[in-house]
Image (cartoon, rainbow, N blue to C red):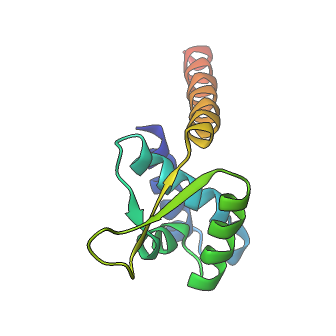
Amino acid sequence: MIARKEHRARRLREELIPTQLFGEPAWDLLLDLFAHSIVNVEIPISSAQIGAHCAPTTALRYIEKFEDEGMIARHKSEKDGRVAYLKLTDAALVSVGSYLMNIAGIESERSIADT
């Protein structure tokens, strides 16, 4: 899937070109949540923080901003009230999915043009 591919590509870029100049935790967070949301898997906030590849407090700020924008939905675990789960809202799924499909289309056009 393109969201996971993009997320892995960003990790590879960080590994091969070690610099702090590439940081985009908000986008990393959205990519990770998108990949989980399209398979209908909600993830704990702690996992989302890891997916954002930044300090936990920074990730929490982005999570709160995305919640305020209506892009992320949060709910508490039924089994453990200390744990909260996240997923993208339907509107965010459409927005991020549309972007990724457009990028995939652009990449396909480039590979056809290169042949």
Name, please, the residue furthest toward the left.
79
Check the image and report above or below for 49 versus 66. Answer: below
Quarter location, residue 67: bottom right
Which image quarter is the N terminus in? top left
**Res 19 visible:** no
Q: Nearer the viewer, residue 19 or 1?
A: 1
Quarter location, residue 72: bottom right
> In the image, 95: left or right of 79?
right
Q: Nearer the viewer, residue 88 or 51?
A: 88
Q: Tell me residue 82's x, y (percent).
A: 39, 82
Q: Tell me residue 21's x, y (percent).
A: 73, 72
Q: Tell me residue 63's x, y (percent).
A: 62, 67
Which image quarter is the C terminus in? top right
> In the image, 107: left or right of 75?
right
Residue at position x 67%, y 59% from top? 66
Residue at position x 56%, y 83% from top? 56
